[in-house]
Amino acid sequence: MLIINKISELQSQLQNERQKGHSIGLVPTMGALHEGHASLVRRSVSENDVTVVSIFLNPTQFNDKKDLERYPRTLEADCKLLEQCGAQIAFAPSVEEIYPEPDTRTFSYPPTDSVMEGAMRPGHFNGVCQIVSKLFSYTNPDRAYFGEKDYQQIAVIRRMVTDLGLKLIMVPCPVIREESGLAMSSRNTLLTDEERAIAANIYRVMKESLSLNAMVSETHDYVVDNINAIEGLEVQYFSIVDGDTLADITSWEDAESIVGCITVFCGSKPIRLIDHIRYK
Ligand code: PAF
């Protein structure tokens, strides 16, 4: 596996591949890779001739400096895992390489980027669009792989792909869960064992809510009340929304696809965990 730090080197390597008629799969990551990422990489390897995995902790999507500072950094282990998964290229640039000048572009795709995470973390999705659009332009991938764990992120990036008229195929990949049901996340490594066990209740309660046969508002309250009742967990928001536009819904008939998106603070630090469940 090649480890590339420079954009120009990445581009000339990929130009060679294109000349050979090879297809390119891109898996954008911020490192601290786990089995969830590995599943995206394996999928890309099985569907493309060349898989590029970017490892870049993108500062422009963090509106909380502390969150950025404590984000786990595990480059060596990440590269080992990528090699095992069969990736051909790890692209691990510096911040200066990606942002030689501040990125002043703005992206706005309401309501996908203005609700939930967009409301709680102003500027977050603008930063995601800045980096992902750059990665798309460096690699010009045939397919790009994103974990459905960040459900809202996929909805926003889809809008950006349409807006920019990009030809690539977005490939959303299912959430990979620990045995307990906890959605795998790089942030899980910041939890103690006890907090990890407590965090598993988030998915358990959401799953229970699937069989309530209750109205949307009652289902919402069931999830929020039952998670908040567990010591060490505090729901920041739980929104039941149209699975495509992410607009709020009030009745199960309001949309063809419906998901519940949740963010929960866990433990004393606290660590912010996100997850979702599909109702329809
Ligand atoms: O999902 C992530 O890890 C990041 O938001 C992404 C897509 C790699 C952009 O920095």
Image (cartoon, grey):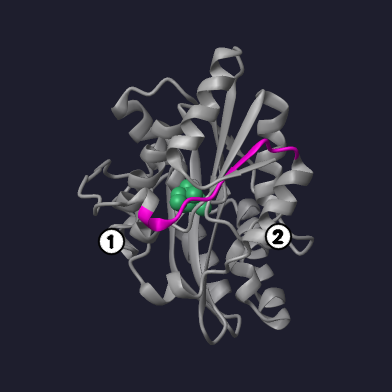
SS under mark 2: helix
Q: Which mark is residue 122?
A: 1
Please rate how many residues cluster around mark 2, counting C-alpha atoms within 10 Å: few if below 14, some from 14 to 19, many from 20.
some
Amino acid identity at mark 2? Ala
In this orientation, does residue 273 appear?
yes
x, y percent for residue 52: 59, 36
| Residue appearing at x 33%, y 63% in the figure | 121
Q: Residue at x 49, y 42 (%)?
A: 258
What is the secondary structure assignment of the residue under circle 1? loop
Looking at the image, which is closer to me, 43 or 113?
43
The reply to whether residue 176 is visible in this rendering is no
State yes or no: residue 267 in magenta: no
Query: Which residue is under mark 2?
Result: 77
The image quadrant that residue 238 belongs to is bottom left
Q: Residue at x 35, y 44 (%)?
A: 129
Q: Position of residue 148 (x, y in %)?
A: 56, 45
The magenta-colored residue range is 86-96
Q: Earlier in the sequence, mark 1 or mark 2?
A: 2
